[in-house]
Amino acid sequence: MPMADDSKKTECIKVWLSEPLELALRRLADQDDRKLSEYICIILRHHVYGYGAPATGEPEGPKRGD
């Protein structure tokens, strides 16, 4: 499944979270020196495309569209 280039983010999704989950995500984002939205985007990219997907959004290994 080829991944689209997601370097230009055009869509906004509102998600309701519990306070403890939001706080935990903020702490993880801070530890990774990232904004919360960027950190959540990385988590979602890994969930959808696999952990082999680099930050650029281009698939690697068995997930690439060869």
Image (cartoon, rainbow, N blue to C red):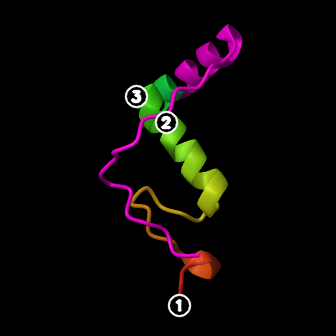
Res. 39 mark:
2
Indicate the amino acid at tag 3. Answer: Lys
Q: Is residue 21 magenta?
A: yes
The answer to whether residue 51 is seen in the rendering is: no
Residue in the picture at 32% in, 54% down: 7
Dot 2 and dot 3 residues touching (CB under 8 Å): yes
Q: Secondary structure at mark 1?
A: loop
Q: Secondary structure at mark 2?
A: helix
Q: Position of residue 32 (x, y in %)?
A: 48, 33
Magenta region: which residues?
1-28
Tell me the mark number nearer the camera, choosing from 2 and 1: 1
* Residue projecting furthest to the bottom: 66
The number of callouts visible is: 3
Name the residue that disc number 3 marks. 35
Q: Residues within 10 Å of mark 3 (few under 14, many from 20)?
A: few
Q: Is residue 39 magenta?
A: no
